[in-house]
């Protein structure tokens, strides 16, 4: 979803996307697991979010996270190696294990897109 190509700031872009999605600030804040007053400050460009917060908002609004990250000066993920390559280099796993790890992440992302309100913190193993 592209809210508006004319949005010049992250705040304007977020606000347009939220309104297009038909969400209140309270609803979006809950989906993104952030404070509502913080979201309002982001939408009015009073605060500068972390990359993690931007990614949460992108997930909650089903937006391209690379586009949002560019607003805060983060280079697009396309400059990073493919997940399988990264896992092999960083974790030293074999090609087959790297493929399994990459697939798990793809499945998780798809699940989050299909059910953005699901609280996956309850699924974590202590």
Image: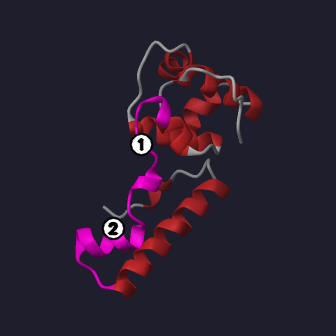
Residue 100 in the figure: left or right of residue 94: right
Task: Assess whether residue 87 is covered by the magenta stretch.
Answer: yes
Q: Secondary structure at mark 1?
A: loop
Q: Is residue 95 visible?
A: yes
Task: Assess whether residue 82 is covered by the magenta stretch.
Answer: yes
- Residue 85 or 28: which is nearer the viewer? 85
- Residue 31 or 78: which is nearer the viewer? 78
Q: Position of residue 92 (x, y in %)?
A: 23, 77
* Residue under the image location 41 percent in, 74 percent down: 101
Q: Position of residue 19 (x, y in %)?
A: 73, 26
Q: Is residue 75 above or below residue 48?
A: below
Q: Is residue 37 above or below residue 53?
A: above
Q: Is residue 110 above or below residue 49?
A: below
- Residue 25 or 67: which is nearer the viewer? 67
* Residue under the image location 49 percent in, 30 percent down: 71
Magenta stretch bounds: 70-94
* Residue under the image location 64 percent in, 22 percent down: 7
**Cβ–Cβ below 8 Å for labels 2 and 1?**
no
Q: Closer to the camera: disc 2 or disc 1? A: 1
* Residue under the image location 41 percent in, 42 percent down: 75
Residue 41 in the figure: left or right of residue 20: left
Label 1 belongs to which residue?
Answer: 75
Label 2 belongs to which residue?
Answer: 86
Mark 2 and mark 1: span between their CA atoms?
17 Å
- The quadrant of the picture occupied by the N terminus is top right
Q: Position of residue 28 (x, y in %)?
A: 61, 32
Q: Is residue 33 visible?
A: no
Q: Position of residue 10 (x, y in %)?
A: 54, 25
């Amino acid at each position: 979803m592209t809210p508006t190509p004319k949005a010049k700031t992250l705040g304007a872009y977020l606000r347009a996307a939220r309104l297009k999605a038909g969400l209140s600030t309270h609803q979006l804040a809950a989906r993104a697991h952030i404070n509502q007053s913080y979201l309002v400050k982001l939408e009015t460009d009073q605060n500068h979010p972390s990359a993690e917060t931007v990614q949460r908002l992108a997930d909650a609004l089903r937006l391209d996270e690379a586009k949002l990250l560019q607003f805060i000066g983060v280079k697009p993920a396309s400059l990073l190696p493919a997940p399988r390559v990264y896992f092999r280099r960083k974790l030293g796993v074999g090609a087959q294990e790297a493929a399994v790890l990459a697939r798990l992440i793809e499945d998780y992302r798809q699940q989050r897109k299909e059910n953005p309100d699901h609280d996956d913190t309850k699924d974590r193993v202590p």
